[in-house]
């Protein structure tokens, strides 16, 4: 299975004010542990990446590429391949400079590529509840998820 992640920084006023940065990474479930997926960085290509960008961030941040083009933005793409057939946990650390808020959001992609779980920056339960949900959905000890979250919270 091919994995695509994005890191971006956007600063726009129209049609709404967005000052947001986010970076993502992926983990695969192996032997009931979450192992980082190695990725390779490449430049964002509008023809190749717009639909994937919108699919990734429409539900997480309620934004699309169309929001970005009204201001200044930088997008980086990270790609990786996974041979094992198990769920993928995507983790996005973000900083919203308008609301003065930062945090971590999650997505779980099933082995068939279907979305199993997604957070939303505006409507997600408290972090500890989400950590529990992620751990249960993946069948891992919540300490594995907590250690990943700690790594990102320190970096924000």
Image (cartoon, rainbow, N blue to C red):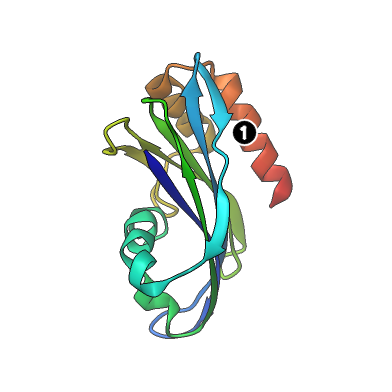
Q: Relative to residue 134, is residue 76 drawn left or right?
A: right
Q: How many marks?
A: 1
Mark 1 Cα within 10 Å, few/some/many (few <14, many 20+)? some
Q: Front-most of 21 and 45?
A: 45
Q: Is residue 63 visible?
A: no
How far across and down, in percent of the image, does residue 122 sit? 42, 54
Q: Is residue 85 above or below residue 95?
A: above
Q: Is residue 9 above or below residue 85?
A: below
How far across and down, in percent of the image, does residue 156 sit? 69, 52
How far across and down, in percent of the image, does residue 90 sit? 47, 41
Q: Relative to residue 144, is residue 120 drawn left or right?
A: left
The residue under the point 50% across, 15% down is: 32
Q: Is residue 15 above or below residue 102?
A: below
Q: Relative to residue 44, is residue 58 drawn left or right?
A: left
The residue under the point 57% across, 57% down is: 41
Secondary structure beneath label 1: helix
Q: Quadrant of residue 14?
A: bottom left
Q: Front-most of 122 and 81?
A: 81
Q: Which residue is mark 1?
A: 148
The residue under the point 40% across, 53% down is: 60
The residue under the point 53% across, 16% down is: 141
Can you name the residue that lies furthest to the right here?
154
How far across and down, in percent of the image, does residue 115 sit? 29, 40
């Amino acid at each position: 299975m091919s994995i695509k992640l994005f890191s971006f920084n956007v600063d726009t006023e129209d049609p709404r004010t967005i000052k947001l940065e986010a970076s993502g990474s992926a983990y695969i479930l192996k032997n009931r542990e979450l192992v980082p997926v190695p990725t390779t960085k490449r430049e964002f290509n509008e023809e190749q990446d717009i639909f994937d960008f919108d699919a990734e961030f429409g539900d997480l941040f309620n934004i699309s590429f169309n929001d970005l083009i009204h201001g200044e933005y930088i997008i980086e793409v990270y790609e990786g391949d996974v041979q094992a057939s198990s769920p993928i946990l995507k983790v996005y650390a973000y900083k919203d400079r308008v609301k003065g808020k930062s945090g971590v959001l999650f997505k779980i992609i099933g082995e068939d590529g279907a979305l199993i779980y997604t957070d939303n920056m505006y409507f997600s339960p408290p972090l500890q509840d989400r950590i529990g949900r992620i751990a249960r959905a993946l069948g891992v000890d919540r300490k594995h998820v907590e250690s990943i979250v700690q790594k990102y919270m320190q970096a924000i």
